[in-house]
């Protein structure tokens, strides 16, 4: 079946405004492009940040979304790794593979890519999407794989692992606190267990999410509305946690992290911040604390795919809701009201021949 001239997509129209509407279908613009028919996609916390106005570089008329799996429908003349009919995972990061940053595996800062899907170019919350530099920005899906699970590899798993666990330098025996039990926080929780920390403490305001965190490996949970996080952690550790992972992106959660980190510890900021935080440098400078920030590079995606396809890592358990493409707006309403709806990760399916 050829690509139709129009398709349906979720379009951003400025802060607080979006619509599921008919738009022109994408076409090949450069020889390195591929056109993918989306079969499964999802909604990210970053999409909600965009709708709040936290990412002003996203302009009105942009199709949202940067995660998904699908089927190759067309490739440019320079694409050699993929052909029509191949099932592929779409990386949230586009990589040319040739520039200075790509050669350092800093794909997020690719000079002709990086995080552009659903940001600077049209994204994956659509029936079709154009993927630049397809040879470096897609991953083949092994036969028989759970494609819903693989959607988690587009963004949240590599983000939680790279920017939370690896930048946080989690090691065996550590006490790790993850502040924020949303999808990225849960991804950090799952992948931190690769390194056998002694304690994994999940902090959130939602008891349902904290209960889920226990099921996924948290040794302890703290509701930061009901309990004094700093006092509780100080009373049960020697001077605080070895690693604090901030996975929300608001000043209050960053503040918790900087107040519970022990001397020599690592504070790994993963959350997308739309406003300044109050960095307590007057207290931290003497503690030999390392603070890291970052945008995911996705250089660990092949390794994470092997752990998922082997069954060692089972991120499909994070999926709380499923919707057809015709209910995309409803999916947004559910995800935006996660506490009320007990939503974690939503999958939107486009299963058509």
Image (cartoon, rainbow, N blue to C red):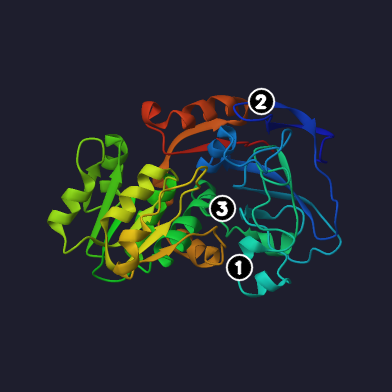
Instruction: Determine which residue is flagged by label 1.
Output: 106
> Which disc number belongs to residue 85?
none
Disc 1 from disc 3: Cα separation: 16 Å
Residue 154 circle label: 3
Q: Judging from the image, what secondary structure is the residue with disc 3 in?
A: loop
Which residue is rendered at x = 50% and y = 50% of the image? 152
* Left or right relative to 148: residue 136: right
**In the image, residue 255 lies at what x, y percent?**
34, 49
Nearer the viewer's eye, disc 1 or disc 3? 1
> 276 and 8: which one is in front?
276
Q: Is residue 114 above or below residue 68?
A: below
- How much space separates mark 2 and mark 1, taking CA atoms? 34 Å
Instruction: For mark 2, give the secondary structure.
Output: strand
The quarter of the displayed image where residue 348 is located: top right
How crowded pointer 3 is (Cα within 10 Å; few <14, some 14-19, many 20+) is rated as many
Q: Nearer the viewer, mark 2 or mark 3?
A: 2
Q: Is residue 220 left or right of residue 68?
A: left
Task: Check contact, mark 2 vs mark 3: CB within 8 A.
Answer: no
Residue named by callout 2: 19
Q: What quarter of the picture does the C terminus occupy?
A: top right
Q: Position of residue 104 (x, y in %)?
A: 62, 74
């Amino acid at each position: 079946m050829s690509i139709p001239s129009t398709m349906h997509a979720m379009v951003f129209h400025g802060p607080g405004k979006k619509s599921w509407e008919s738009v022109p279908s994408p076409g090949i613009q450069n020889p390195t492009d591929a056109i993918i028919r989306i079969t499964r996609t999802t909604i990210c916390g970053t999409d909600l940040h965009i709708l709040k106005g936290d990412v002003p570089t996203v302009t009105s008329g942009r199709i949202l979304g940067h995660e998904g799996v699908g089927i190759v429908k067309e490739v440019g003349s320079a694409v050699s790794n993929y052909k029509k009919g191949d099932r592929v995972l779409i990386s949230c990061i586009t990589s040319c593979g040739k520039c200075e940053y790509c050669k350092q595996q800093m794909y997020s800062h690719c000079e002709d890519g990086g995080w552009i899907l659903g940001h600077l170019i049209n994204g994956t919350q659509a029936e079709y999407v154009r993927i630049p530099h397809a040879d470096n920005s897609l991953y083949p899906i092994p036969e028989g794989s759970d494609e819903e699970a693989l959607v988690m590899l587009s963004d949240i798993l590599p983000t939680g692992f790279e920017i939370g666990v690896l930048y946080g330098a989690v090691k065996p025996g550590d006490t790790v606190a993850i502040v924020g039990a949303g999808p990225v926080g849960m991804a950090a929780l799952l992948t931190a267990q690769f390194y056998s920390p002694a304690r994994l403490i999940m902090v959130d305001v939602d008891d349902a999410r904290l209960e889920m965190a226990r099921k996924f490996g948290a040794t302890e949970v703290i509701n930061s509305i009901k309990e004094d996080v700093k006092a509780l952690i100080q009373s049960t550790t020697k001077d605080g946690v070895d690693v604090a992972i901030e996975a929300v992106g608001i000043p209050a959660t960053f503040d918790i992290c900087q107040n519970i980190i022990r001397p020599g510890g690592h504070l790994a900021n993963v959350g997308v911040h739309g406003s300044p935080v109050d960095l307590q440098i007057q207290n931290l400078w003497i503690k030999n604390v390392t603070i890291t920030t970052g945008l995911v590079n996705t250089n660990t995606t092949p390794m994470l795919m092997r752990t998922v396809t082997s069954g060692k890592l089972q991120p499909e358990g994070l999926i709380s809701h499923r919707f057809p493409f015709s209910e995309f707006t409803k999916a947004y309403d559910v995800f935006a009201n996660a506490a009320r709806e007990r939503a974690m990760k939503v999958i939107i399916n486009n299963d058509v021949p």
